[in-house]
Amino acid sequence: MRHLRIFKLKGLLILGSILVLSMLATSIISSAELNTNLNSNFEVVRGNATVNGSEIRVNGYTVISSSLDSQPYDKLQIEMELLSRNVTGYFFIVFGSKYTNYKEISEGYNRIEVKFDPQYQNKLARIELQLLGDGSIEVQNLKIVKTSPDFKSELRNYTIAIYRNGPFSTDDLIELEFYVNPKKKMNSVEYNIYLSYFGFNIYKKSKGYLFLAGLQPGKDKRFVEKADLGLIPLPGIYNLRVKSDDGWVYEDSFTVLPGIGNLVVVIFIVSIIFAIKNREKLQKLRDIEISKSEKLTVKDYLFITLLSIIGGVVIWYKFKELGNIAILLSILTGLLVFTLSVTLIEEEVIEDDID
């Protein structure tokens, strides 16, 4: 059927737009935050060994070290591949004299992956290999990804660092990841969040975090604050300002892309405009006798329903963190896709009958 083929094409275009925009909004990452180092720069700290490029010749007990060049509250991710010949030992991440992230190195192929959350360290971190044997170790791959906080401030009473995670599209929330390290006991931290869109203030809220039983000096505390993009999120440039009476101000700007929510609004508006523009043709549908060959069959309705369900599921998956609101949005999306699709094919039938 010609009309069914036309409908399928238009229906798939609608569904394809939803899927493409969803993948676009979730796949973007901010590469400017990342600092990747592929150089080993290992040095012999103790023992008898030689470093020749990526190969380390070991004779007896040896300690090899490489600086990570990290700052307090940096996020670090390390991927390391070693090929050991007649050498065993241990892998450590060391902050000053504090040894962490113990991994064993055995003969043959070794893959080491280390991730650790930001923490306040006044000592530079380093990789340390403690090796024993008479052979060699080849560093086949060493990838160090360092992410620095978007904001950091050393205050009289505490140190604070903030990471901003997103938003990439209008479907996302602003997520602020706070890290606090007190220099004396503190009970809370308070601040105000301001958000503007192209210079227009759209969000202002006083916030704070209470530390139950108090936060002792030297104890890091992490907490997350989320904020939306206003009542009706729109794509464009936003300016964020977080200010505390304690004397620190974090300011940032970011660009937000269109999300699935915007697409749902567009579909809704287009369907209303279409209904108004074609109200006369739709009215004539009641007066036109459509032949059985032109009517939608049960298979056609099943196909339309399947597309509507898929579109609704995509919307629910994107907004599932919103709970019942996500369910409502998915139902509305399914109804819109179903109604618009049926209307499009019926319009083709009307035009043929009028002609």
Image (cartoon, rainbow, N blue to C red):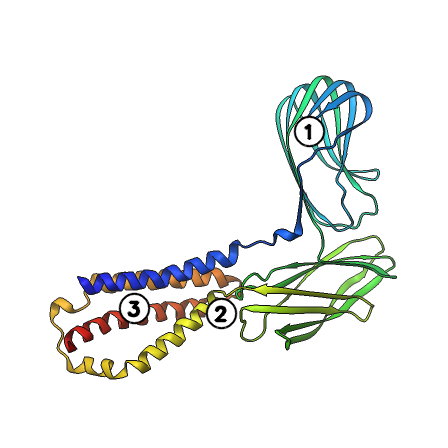
Say left or right for 318 vs 92: left
What kind of residue is marked 3? Ser
**Which structural element holds mark 1?**
strand
Q: Secondary structure at mark 3?
A: helix
Residue under numbered circle 1: 104
Question: Which callout, 3 or 1, points at the residue further toward the start of the chain?
Answer: 1
Please give the name of the residue rendered at 58% of the width and 53% of the height, measured from the top-left corner: 29
Examine the rendering and report whether any part of residue 158 can be seen: yes
The image quadrant where one finds the C terminus is bottom left
Looking at the figure, which quarter contains the N terminus? bottom left
Circle on res. 197? none
Q: Residue at x 78, y 69 (%)?
A: 244
Which residue in the protein does label 3 denote?
Answer: 341
From the top left corner, tell me how far across and down residue 292 is, in percent: 12, 69
**Image coords of residue 53 (percent x, y):** 70, 26
Callout 2, which amino acid? Ile
